[in-house]
Image (cartoon, coloured by chain):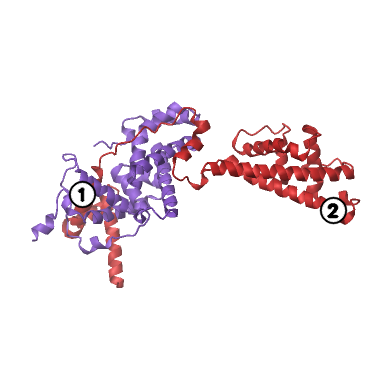
Chain colours: A red, B purple
Amino acid sequence: MSIDQIEHRHDWESQRERLSAYLDDQLSDAENAELTAHLATCERCGAELAELRGTIRLLQALPQPARPRSFAIPEGARAVHVASARRTLREPPASASPRWARVAQWAGTVAASVGILLLLGTALSGALMGGNERAASMPAAAHSSTTQNNTRYGTADRSATPTVSAPASSATAYAAAGQATTAPRSADTPTPATNNQPGNTFATHASPAASPVDGRAGLEITGAALLALGALGFLFGRRARSRTR
Amino acid sequence: MGRQTPHADHSEGDEQLLVARSQRGDVPAFNQLVERYQDSAYGLALRMLGDPELAADVTQDAFVSAFRAVERFRGGSFRAWLLRIVSNACYDQWRAARRRPTMSLELVAGDDHGEAAHQEPHDSFIDDRWNPEATALRGELIELISRALLQLPPEQRLAVVLSDVQGLAYDEIAEVMQTSLGTVKSRIARGRSHLRDLLRTHPELLPSRYRRASEMG
């Protein structure tokens, strides 16, 4: 194709665009006058205009298709609509899973990772330092999670073992996840859910020191609990997400 | 014509009230909006997808999504906002179809065949004096136009359906498609001439055939 032809084609494309806009009364007065004058002499553009107009009329004459049913949404749709509507579709968009499930899965992963780090940390520090210097050399996150642990056992049953506390912890994970979508709790309410935000909550607590031995056991229990909680949060989140597909 | 804009029969204030009530979770109010726009929404989904059952599913899903998202509606044309949700749902279907090799490729393919018209622009075959209001389209012609629409690239198809089948103004189409007026103008123009080329392949079905060609022998 020569340069001329390309340019010619380009011109014709923009001319067609002008003709189309002309039919919709979308040209400026000046453009309109210019095109009207041109149409008086140019047979080719006249024919093109007539065809475009005929095509538009055909489209306008298409009958409104008969709707197979009413698309009114059911009463109480707010609670149930997401899952049920998605299920009627052959394949939902990628973002179909409820947000809480994604948050639960994400928060679960974070919690489990922190738990693993805690367990590894206590085991390592126990092995390396015999437990004496541990409290001083512990990383900040592990240090303050002693507090986190104390807080948990302050509000929940002190005698709960990690395994027993796991179901309650998963409820905590849900609560934390739910915060994103449901009404946020008031800031002054002491809520176990905030314990699930590792980054800020852990670091901001000032730590009234527990005794080294208690602290170490506490760290291990906290690690195990976080691991179990995280795994549960992750699994529940994943199951809820796959259910919507 | 039967394709008057819904705004013609309903007052804007009435609609704003219904939207406001929907935003407070009022399902019956939202269903009045559904009532008002469901023909338009289903019509768009059908023209875009070509499959009545699928179009119904997509429309239902779009209304559910719209109800969930209506809190975030910030004014402007409610119809444009709604039809945008419908067209997005159609695009989601195509994305899903692309992952399923069984679906016809022509639904997702889209190239410009503008060449044919360029070569023979004088071969006029659609009689622009034909009056659609006086004559109902025959079934096979409806079928031909519907199939031709489905062969347009999705963006041209959406622009042409919104403009010429649903009767939306350019600025409302720009809202639906989230693009500029210039882009809307060019998609409509390309869609129309592309469609004309496709219809040209079945001149025997068109209201006036070979007008020029037969004159010339």
Question: In the drawing, does residue B14 fall left or right of residue B1?
Answer: right
Q: Earlier in the sequence, mark 2 or mark 1?
A: 1
Provide residue B176's location: percent of width, then percent of height: 40, 44
Position of the N terminus of chain A by quadrant:
bottom left
Label 1 neighbour load within 10 Å: few <14, some 14-19, many 20+: many
Q: Nearer the viewer, residue B53 or A17?
A: B53
Mark 1: secondary structure: helix
- Foreground label between 2 and 1: 2
Question: In the drawing, does residue B193 fall left or right of residue A131?
Answer: left
Provide residue A127's location: percent of width, then percent of height: 86, 55
Q: Is residue B210 visible?
A: yes
Q: Give the residue displayed 20% in from the left and 58% down from the top.
A: A45
Label 2 neighbour load within 10 Å: few <14, some 14-19, many 20+: some
Question: In the drawing, does residue A196 fall left or right of residue A25?
Answer: right
Residue marked by disc 2:
A125
The chain identifier of the residue carrying mark 2 reads: A
Q: Give the residue displayed 73% in from the left and 40% down from the top.
A: A195
Residue marked by disc 1:
A54
Write down the quadrant of residue A185 in the picture: top right
Q: Is residue A27 visible?
A: no
Question: In the drawing, does residue B137 fall left or right of residue A156?
Answer: left
Q: Give the residue displayed 40% in from the left and 50% down from the top.
A: B180
The chain identifier of the residue carrying mark 1 reads: A
Mark-to-mark CA distance, 2 and 1: 83 Å
Task: Give the number of the disc on residue B215.
Answer: none
Q: Amino acid at mark 2?
A: Ser
In the image as oriented, which residue stretches furthest toward the bottom? A2
Q: Amino acid at mark 1?
A: Gly
Cβ atoms under marks 2 and 1 closer than 8 Å: no
Write down the quadrant of residue B167 in the picture: top left
Provide residue A88's location: percent of width, then percent of height: 44, 39
